Image (cartoon, rainbow, N blue to C red):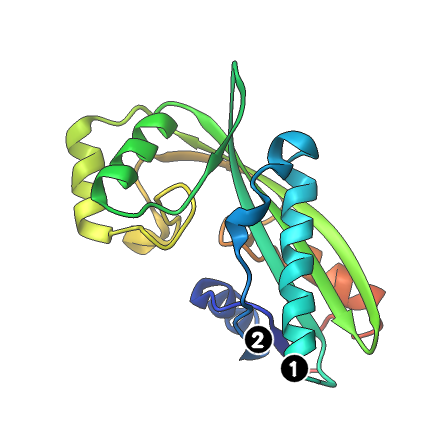
Amino acid sequence: MELLLASGSRYRAEVLRGAGYTVRTSAPEVDERALDHWLVERGPEALAVELAQLKLRDVLTRRSTGLPVVAADQVGILWGADGPLLLTKADDHESACSQLRRLSGTTHQLINGLIVWRNGESATGVDVMEVTFRDLSEEEIRTYVERFEPFDTAGSYRIEDDGGHVPFVTEVIGEDRSGVLGLPLPLLRRLLVEVGAGDIPGQ
């Protein structure tokens, strides 16, 4: 099956290709930080879905397609006594290290908003993953950031680094590990069925 991915993320494209889909991509022009206030006002799930919706709308206004279109957004949240802390993409080594210090010894959530559009019909869903870190030393944090430079992902880490066995990730809870990468495949297949696109790669 061929899909149009409304994203510039190579990780999402790799997830789809690894599952057997043929993928075209169209990077949306969306300011993802413009809706940060939604986190407190409406909650992380609503934020993830709305950001995915914005990406979908942007791509559909700039190109027409007969392919099913997949739009996704992932919101990372660390819950604390003062409410949710939004995990962001780090600008540099120090901000990445700072974010990993906050995540050390904690469990955070990765909330995926996913929309599939086909011929004017759309289906929407949410997938929630929980990721637990063991306690990290300052040396471990700095070594990881210097080696992998995780500046293109919220939370300043990539689950696929080090061959997919990041040593400080002790537990991942959720329907499928693809949810950590920002494109939960089981949810995608259900949404494809909802819009009448089928769900079998290659069909």
Res. 20 mark: 2
Q: What element carries label 1?
A: loop
| Residue under the image location 70 percent in, 55 percent down | 187
Quadrant where the C terminus sits is bottom right
Image-quadrant location for residue 155 = top left
Compared with residue 115, is residue 17 higher up or lower down, i.e. above or below? Answer: below
Where is residue 192 shown, x and y percent of the image? 76, 67
Q: Residue at x 66, y 60 (%)?
A: 54
- Of 64 and 125, the residue lying toward us: 64
Asked whether 73 or 61 is in front, the reply is 61
Residues at marks 2 and 1, CA–CA distance in whole angstroms: 7 Å
Q: What is the x, y in percent for residue 143? A: 16, 41
Q: Is residue 24 left or right of residue 170?
A: right
- Residue 202, disc: 1
User: Mark 1 is on which residue type?
Assistant: Gly
Total numbered labels? 2
Residue positioned 59% across, 37% down in the render: 37
Horizontal side of 98 relative to 193 (left or right) equals: left
146 w.r.t. 44: above or below: below
Given contact means CB atoms under 8 Å apart, are the residues at marks 2 and 1 in contact? Answer: yes
Please tell me whether mark 2 sits on a helix, a strand or a loop. loop
Percent position of residue 191, x then y:
76, 61
Looking at this rendering, what residue extends furthest in the top direction?
Answer: 81
Q: Mark 2 packing: few (<14 Cα in 10 Å), some, or many (20+)?
A: some
Q: Which of marks 2 and 1 is nearer the N terminus?
A: 2
Q: Can residue 135 be seen in this view?
A: yes
Question: Which image quadrant: the N terminus?
Answer: bottom right
* Residue in the image at 84% along x and 73% along y: 196
What type is the residue that disc 2 sits on?
Gly
Front-most of residues 190 and 48: 48
Does residue 198 appear in this view?
Answer: no
